[in-house]
Image: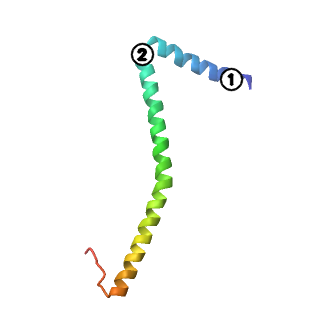
Amino acid sequence: MNTYYFSLFAVFAVIIFLMVLDPNIATYIDLQFRNLIVQLKRQYYLLTIGIQIKYENWKLMRSLKKMRKELNLPNETNS
């Protein structure tokens, strides 16, 4: 367990040293972190809202088919 913590400390020490040495590395790491946050939010929204949109689309198409059947309207085909 001590080697694990020592390894983490060494990695962070090297990253902090590089950030002090060159400010561009700090900017790059910040941008990568922000990109990670955006991608995580994107995946979350795709998983939650995407399912809801598919369900609403299915319900809408189902009611449209029922209305066409009741009103004896022809089915639209895109061919």
The quadrant in which the N terminus is found is top right
The colour scheme of the drawn protein is rainbow
The residues tagged by marks 2 and 1 sit, at their Cα atoms, a distance apart of: 26 Å
Residue 62 vs residue 4: left or right? left
Quickly name the residue at label 2.
23
Residue 24 vs residue 15: left or right? left
Query: Which image quadrant for residue 8?
Result: top right
Residue displayed at 68% across by 23% down: 5
Which residue is at the front of the view, 73 or 14?
A: 73
Residue displayed at 48% across by 36% down: 36
Residue displayed at 39% across by 73% down: 61
User: Given contact means CB atoms under 8 Å apart, are the residues at marks 2 and 1 in contact?
Assistant: no
* Amino acid found under the numbered disc labelled 1: Tyr
Question: x, y percentage for residue 27?
Answer: 42, 22
Question: x, y percentage for residue 51?
Answer: 48, 59
Relative to 59, residue 29 above or below: above
Question: x, y percentage for residue 12?
Answer: 58, 20
Please tell me how crowded label 1 is: few (under 14), some (14-19), or many (20+) other residues with Cα within 10 Å.
few
Dot 1 lies on which element? Answer: helix
